[in-house]
Amino acid sequence: MESSALGLPPSESVAGSGGEPARPGYLILGRVLRPHGLHGEVKVAWYAEAWEPFQGIGTVWLGTPGGAREPMGVERGRPQGGAVVLKLAGVETPEAAAALVGREVAIPREAAPPAPDGSFYHYDILGLRVVAGERPLGTVRDILETPAHDVYVVEGPGGEWLLPATRAHIRRLDPAAGLIEIEPWADLVSPSSGGGESPEAL
């Protein structure tokens, strides 16, 4: 049930209904760091774990946070360490590349490639209802990334509590159905408790 493979921050959200978190219209893939080389390439801080799922994308949208976005064709790209080097159409010189520094690199949500089996985009997890059988326990409001696995922050009637995104804790994760079903014996921890069971523990 680990969901950390494609944990991308959302951008330009559209409002959800019923108090659910807004769903993003765009996925922010990275941010332009600096020009690279002499031919207009840019080095991008890459937020996804890998470049390969996105290497077939022909267009990205560049813009500032909360501002307008401009579509730009992708001529080529390659990973470089934890970053990605992109050659964008119409950007032919280091000076033109420098003008893009600080811009977010995004794609429309519907253009995102499918997540690998057993993984999910974070925006597919946010807003899911958490249940144990027929008992509602709350809604996923945030996701904490840890070296071992993601941890879901769930807002329930008794306050917030933490749900590790592991098979030991989660019986079923079904974004299409809008819910996460947990194992009935799972130990659930309140963020403020420092350990032990939350008010929602079973």
Image (spheres, rainbow, N blue to C red):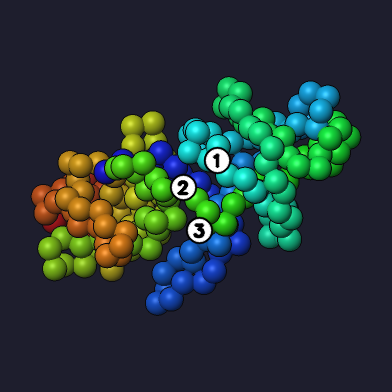
Residue assigned mark 3: 110
Q: How far apart in space, not on screen, are marks 3 and 2 (Cα)? A: 8 Å
Label for residue 103?
Answer: none
Classify mark 1: helix, strand or loop: loop
Q: Nearer the viewer, residue 116 or 34?
A: 116
User: Seen in the image, is 199 located left or right of residue 176?
Assistant: left
Residue 93 at x, y percent in the picture: 86, 32
Q: Nearer the viewer, residue 82 or 96?
A: 96
Label for residue 113?
Answer: 2
Q: How far apart in space, not on screen, are marks 1 and 3 (Cα)? A: 14 Å
Q: Is residue 175 above or below residue 78?
A: below
The residue at 40%/77% (across/down) is 18
Q: Is label 1 or label 2 in front?
A: 1
Could you tell me the amino acid type at mark 1? Gly
Residue assigned mark 1: 56
Residue 21 at x, y percent in the picture: 45, 65
Q: Residue furthest right?
A: 95
Is the residue under label 2 in contact with that under label 1 (CB below 8 Å)? yes
